[in-house]
């Protein structure tokens, strides 16, 4: 498939990073279409299984047949083309936009989709954590560790795929929100979309969908019905109420990985005393959970 006939893959660092916002903006382009009925496909998230399949199959091939590394590359490309056709088959004549708010196994992406275009959406981790807690009831400590792991995954992917730098683009949610017009034209150029046909005014007045700020109370679930933006709506202010102790914990767990993505942490001194003890307890608890988690999985699957 040519690049312009390939799906557009949108991956978010974590849920609450704004993938719905970016997806809805792309959907305003007349050449783009949704992957009905699979709204969040998670296809990239399990590419490790496809990589294992390809490796185990290729291991059975006899070199005397004349097979080599290029033969397995052909297999990998064919597997990726099958996935692309799965996404594209309901959208004949359009460019399907495949969305997943996760970056798990992104390191395998270009092995199976060497001609595809990939958008990776990142956002200030403090906003993500706070929004996830409010929207989905996430617990703070696991959210911080999930954020750090996802950021490290993106950083490693960026370093190891320098040869594919023209095939992927990291988009900052904050830039997309504050400078929508310029960001959209840059993204459109990257995706080889004709932006002369794009309805920019609709994009600039796009209603809100799924924001944690749309909840009227703690018991209400997040919904994706469109709503007009309140005049005081500010998605960059999610964590303005954080204490220095909370910033210190964030900096310790996710700060370096997020800083590598361009998000500067708030400089705070070690609060000391009770907060230091609390941090040590949290570190010990997380280490214990990490050690016991594989055992729990084996017992559950036995």
Image: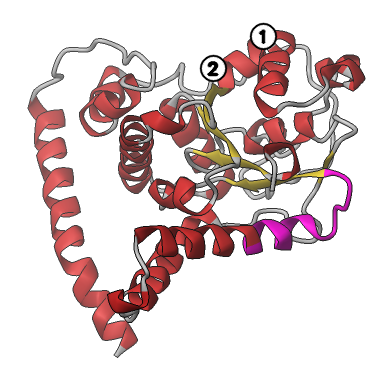
Position of residue 197 measured from the top left corner of the image (x, y, whole percent): 91, 21
* Residue wearing tag 1: 179
Q: Where's residue 227, x and y in %?
A: 84, 31
Q: Nearer the viewer, residue 251 or 169?
A: 169
On the image, the x and y values in percent for residue 299 come to: 25, 84
In the rendered image, which quarter is residue 121 located in?
top right
Image: 247 above or below 223:
above
Q: Residue furthest bottom?
A: 302
Say left or right for 292 vs 150. left
Give above or below for 289 relative to 127. Answer: below
Query: 153 or 20: which is nearer to us?
Result: 153
Mark 2 Cα-neighbour bin, 10 Å: few <14, some 14–19, many ≥20: few
Picture residue at 77% right of the left edge, 53% below the top: 35
Return the residue at label 2.
237
- In the image, what residue occupies the spot 83% across and 18% down? 195
Seen at 35% across and 59% down, the residue is 69
Query: Is the image coloured rainbow, by chain, by secondary structure, or in one colour?
Result: secondary structure
Category of crowding for the residue at label 1, using alpha-carbon neighbours closer than 10 angstroms: few (below 14), some (14–19), many (at least 20): few
Magenta segment includes 50? no
The span picked out in magenta is 82-94
């Amino acid at each position: 498939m040519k690049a312009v006939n390939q799906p557009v893959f949108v991956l978010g660092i974590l849920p609450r990073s704004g993938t719905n916002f970016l997806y809805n903006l792309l959907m305003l382009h007349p050449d783009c279409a949704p992957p009905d009925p699979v709204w969040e496909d998670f296809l990239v998230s399990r590419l490790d299984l496809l990589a294992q399949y390809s490796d185990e199959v290729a291991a059975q091939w006899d070199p005397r047949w004349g097979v080599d590394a290029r033969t397995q590359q052909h297999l990998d490309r064919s597997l990726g083309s099958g996935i692309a056709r799965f996404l594209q088959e309901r959208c004949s004549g359009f460019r399907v936009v495949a969305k997943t708010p996760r970056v798990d196994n992104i390191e395998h992406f270009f092995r199976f989709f060497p001609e595809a275009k990939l958008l990776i959406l990142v956002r200030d981790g403090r906003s993500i954590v706070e929004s996830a807690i409010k929207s989905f009831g996430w617990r703070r400590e696991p959210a911080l560790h999930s954020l750090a792991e996802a950021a490290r995954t993106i950083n490693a992917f960026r370093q190891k795929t320098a040869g594919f730098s023209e095939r992927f683009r990291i988009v900052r949610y904050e830039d997309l929100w504050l400078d929508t017009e310029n960001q959209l034209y840059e993204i459109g150029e990257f995706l080889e979309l004709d932006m002369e046909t794009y309805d920019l005014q609709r994009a600039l007045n796009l209603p809100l969908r799924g924001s944690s700020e749309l909840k009227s109370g703690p018991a209400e679930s997040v919904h994706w019905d469109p709503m007009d933006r309140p005049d005081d709506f500010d998605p960059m202010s999610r964590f303005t109420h954080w204490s220095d102790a909370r910033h210190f914990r964030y900096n310790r767990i996710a700060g370096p990985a997020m800083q590598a993505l361009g998000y500067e942490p708030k400089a705070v001194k070690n609060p000391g005393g009770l907060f230091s003890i609390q941090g040590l307890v949290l570190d010990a608890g997380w280490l214990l959970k990490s050690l016991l988690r594989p055992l729990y999985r084996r017992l559950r699957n036995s």
